[in-house]
Structure formats: structure tokens, C-alpha cells
């Protein structure tokens, strides 16, 4: 009797786990398995927006692009990597920190010894924001050529993944989205950005928050510069062309930067590597024209390409 009960329990547990894994695989709420997408079922994966660090790590390893874009939300929203070449991928994630950027750069070079170019978009916030990494950052995933056992469990068998799958299906059944959160090359999609900033409904929200930031601890700031210095040396030692840029922001956002600290950061950054400092031309017309920005901190891709990237064509 007890043996039959035990086998029945194990069998039921196996069925439940298999069912959950199948649902999570076919719905693929985190954009991990590149499962088929169907409108009204799983076409729009809103929860993937909070799991960029996971799915972009895996995509970077699997795609092995020859050109990689790294940065925070400014680059995630504005840079279509195709302007730099067909075999390119935007591995930027929101609130990316220098240590994360270094880990992504190491992975890009490790999986593709023929990596040609690294496009790095940095900004003052990346160094002034007092965090070493954000939730979801998994350096172990970036050091292997396959999805780790931990992440496989997290995306197939966890209750969080099942909740995400159910949420994804419910969202798509109700809203019938015909666009995806991300383009195949990693960039946050334009329709998803329009929806995101329509819901946020505040042009100066991100900028106003900066006014209350305290300067970072000197030791933390130095750690961030050490990580960026190591990234510069990594590219040089491996023959990878490095392009470092500061993306333009709206004049309102620029005026939220503390002038003395910003100039000190700028000087220290340019001492490490040449920088295309587009924010220094903030008085140009496009930096005071709201229509060129999603909000004061984030330039739109069209404006970025029109005004900044002509020299890369």
C-alpha cells in the first residue's frame, strides 16, 4: 500500500513538473528558448522586460555576434545595432553597471574570438548611481556556453516562471498585441517603448529623481572606474575596436547633473579612452526638442540615427 502511494505521489509530481516545464517552454515568457510566437497566446512578453540580464546573456552566447552594443536604458532604447553592421547585437540592459558591462564584454570576446567591435554607451548615472549590479545579473551564466542548470530550473520549473507564463497568456488573450517587446537584435522595440512611456506619462520623471541623489562613495566610484579601465584593457589586449560614447540627453536632464561632479567624471573617463561625447553638444536644436526624446533622459532611435550616427553609415 505504502509503495503504491509512494509511486503514485512520485508519478503525480513528475506529471506536474513535466506539465509546468512544457507550459513554460512553449509560452517562453522570458524570451529564453526562442519558442514560436502566436498573437493572442504569447506574442508579447511583457515580463521579459524585467529579465533582460538573463535572456540577453543567453542570446549573446548563442548568437556570437561580431559587433556588440553595451549600455544602460539609453542604449537599450535608442541604438539599433544594425547601423553598425548586420552581424550585431544590442546587449544593453536597463541600469547596467560597469561591472556588468565588463562581464558582458568578457563573454562577448570569449564566445567569439573574432569579435570586431564593442560599442559602449556610458553616462554619468552609470557611475553616480550607487549600485554594483542589479537584480537578475548572473555572472555564472556569462562564463558558460549554455544555459546553466540554475537558470534552466528558474525558467522551466519554478513557480515564478509558471506565474509569468500564465500572466503572459492572459495578457495576450486580453490585449492581442501584434508586436514584441524586443527586436531580434536585442533592441527594445519601438511600439513597446511607445506603450511604456505612454503609461509612465512623465517627461521629467527620471530627471527629477537625479536631483535627490547623493554622490557615490569614493571607494564605490573607484571600483566602477576600475571595471571600466579593465574593459578598455580587455579590448586592447584582444584586438577589439572599442567605441565609447555618451549619448545625448534633453537639456532639462543635462541640467540635473551636478556640474562639478559631472566635469570630474567626464575628465576621468576621457583619460581612460577616447570618448564620443555627444552630450557636450546639448545646446543643439535636437536636445531641446521634446519630440526627439521618449523622456528627458532617453533619446529616440530616429533622432540618434539622424543626428549622431551618419558617420557610421
Image (cartoon, rainbow, N blue to C red):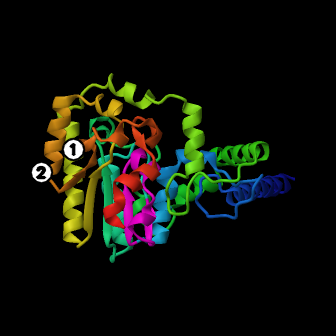
- Tell me if residue 77 is in the magenta stretch: yes
Confirm whether residue 80 shows in the render: yes
Percent x, y for residue 291?
47, 39
Query: 291 or 17, which is in the foreground?
Result: 291
Mark 1 Cα within 10 Å, few/some/many (few <14, many 20+)? some
Query: Residue at position x 24%, y 66% from top?
Result: 235
Quadrant assignment, res 290: top left
Instruction: Say whether residue 155 is magenta.
Output: no
Of 208 and 283, nearer the camera is 283
Q: Horizontally, is 197 left or right of 68 in the view?
A: right
Query: Pointer 2: residues within 10 angstroms few (<14), some, or many (20+)?
Result: few
Rendered location of residue 109, percent (x, y)? 33, 69
Q: In this figure, which residue is indicated by the disc labeled 2?
A: 271
The reply, left or right, for residue 12 in relation to residue 206 is right
Q: Residue at x 21, y 53 (%)?
A: 275
Which residue was labeled with disc 1? 223
- Residue 76 in view, yes or no: no
Outermost residue on the right side: it is: 1
Amino acid at each position: 500500500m505504502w509503495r503504491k502511494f509512494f509511486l503514485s505521489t512520485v508519478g503525480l509530481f513528475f506529471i506536474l513538473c513535466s506539465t509546468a516545464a512544457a507550459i513554460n517552454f512553449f509560452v517562453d515568457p522570458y524570451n529564453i528558448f526562442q519558442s514560436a510566437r502566436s498573437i493572442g497566446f504569447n506574442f508579447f512578453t511583457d515580463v521579459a522586460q524585467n529579465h533582460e540580464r538573463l535572456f540577453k546573456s543567453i542570446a549573446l552566447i548563442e548568437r556570437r555576434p561580431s559587433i556588440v552594443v553595451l549600455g544602460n536604458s539609453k542604449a537599450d532604447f535608442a541604438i539599433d545595432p544594425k547601423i553598425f553592421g548586420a552581424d550585431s547585437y544590442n546587449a544593453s540592459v536597463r541600469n547596467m553597471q560597469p561591472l556588468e558591462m565588463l562581464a558582458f564584454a568578457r563573454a562577448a570576446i570569449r564566445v567569439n574570438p573574432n569579435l570586431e567591435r564593442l560599442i559602449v554607451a556610458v553616462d554619468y548615472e552609470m557611475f553616480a548611481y550607487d549600485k554594483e549590479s542589479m537584480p537578475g545579473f548572473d555572472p555564472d551564466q556569462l562564463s558558460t556556453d549554455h544555459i546553466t542548470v540554475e537558470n534552466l530550473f528558474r525558467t522551466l520549473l519554478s513557480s515564478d516562471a509558471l506565474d509569468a507564463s500564465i500572466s503572459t497568456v492572459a495578457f495576450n488573450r486580453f490585449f492581442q498585441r501584434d508586436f514584441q517587446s524586443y527586436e531580434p537584435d536585442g533592441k527594445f522595440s519601438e511600439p513597446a517603448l511607445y506603450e511604456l512611456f505612454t503609461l509612465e506619462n512623465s517627461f521629467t520623471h527620471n530627471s527629477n529623481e537625479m536631483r535627490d541623489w547623493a554622490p557615490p562613495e569614493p571607494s564605490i566610484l573607484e571600483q566602477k572606474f576600475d571595471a571600466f579601465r579593465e574593459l578598455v584593457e580587455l579590448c586592447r589586449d584582444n584586438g577589439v575596436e572599442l567605441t565609447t560614447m555618451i549619448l545625448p540627453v534633453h537639456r532639462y536632464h543635462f541640467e540635473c547633473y551636478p556640474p562639478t561632479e559631472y566635469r570630474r567624471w567626464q575628465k576621468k573617463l576621457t583619460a581612460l579612452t577616447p570618448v564620443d561625447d555627444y552630450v557636450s553638444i546639448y545646446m543643439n536644436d535636437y536636445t531641446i526638442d521634446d519630440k526627439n526624446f521618449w523622456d528627458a533622459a532617453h533619446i529616440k532611435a530616429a533622432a540618434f540615427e539622424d543626428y549622431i550616427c551618419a558617420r557610421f553609415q
